Image (tube, rainbow, N blue to C red):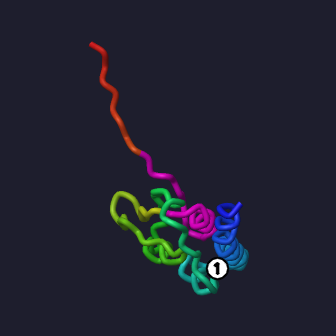
Amino acid sequence: MRILLSRAGRALPVVAAAAALAAATALPVATATAAAAAVAAPVARAAVGDEAPYIVTVHQDVDPAAVARMVGASPDYVYRTALHGFSARLSPGQVAALHVIPGVESVQEDGGVSSFETAG
């Protein structure tokens, strides 16, 4: 039961931040930068074990690093050429918060790639 309470205690700040982001996006907002000003608190960081690697893409007119800061993420890499976005380890709460930010195009879990040898 202690583990469940611990996780629930960590989830409350994340839920509150996601609700604040949802409320901010309900207002007419021109860019993600303006939405960031409307959000009072960043999303709380989760324990490292709760995070997974993600690739986030954003519209060309949105700063990927600013979007990462909005959810309290530390990007491993910021893409500005072939992709416009960033990669980072994100908690489930950060992923949920990214889905409601204007200008975010996709949030995809990063997975490994493997090749298969042909039997011959």
The residue sitting at the left extreme is 120
Name the residue rendered at 35%, 57% in the picture.
82
Name the residue rendered at 37%, 41% in the picture.
113
Where's residue 47, x and y in %?
52, 67
Q: Quadrant of the C terminus?
A: top left
The residue sitting at the top extreme is 120
Circle 1 packing at 10 Å, graded few (<14), some (14-19), many (20+), is: some
Where's residue 73, x and y in %?
48, 71
Q: Quadrant of the N terminus?
A: bottom right
| Left/right of residue 97 with respect to residue 110 in the rendered view | right
34 vs 90, nearest the viewer: 90
Where's residue 81, x and y in %?
33, 62
Task: Read off the residue under disc 1.
Answer: 29
Q: Does residue 115 sit above or below 28 in this rendering?
A: above
Q: Does residue 26 sit above or below 106 in this rendering?
A: below
Residue 24 within the segment the image draws in magenta: no
Total labels: the figure holds 1
In the image, which residues are magenta? 90-111
**Quarter residue 34 falls in:** bottom right
Residue 97 within the segment the image draws in magenta: yes
Name the residue rendered at 55%, 65% in the picture.
104
Where's residue 58, x and y in %?
49, 65
Name the residue rendered at 60%, 70% in the picture.
102
| Left/right of residue 109 with respect to residue 97 in the rendered view | left
Q: Secondary structure at mark 1?
A: loop
Q: Inspect the image, locate mark 1, and give the three-letter code of the amino acid beneath it.
A: Val
| Left/right of residue 7 with respect to residue 74 in the rendered view | right
21 vs 8, nearest the viewer: 8
The residue sitting at the front extreme is 2
**Quarter residue 19 falls in:** bottom right
73 vs 9, nearest the viewer: 9
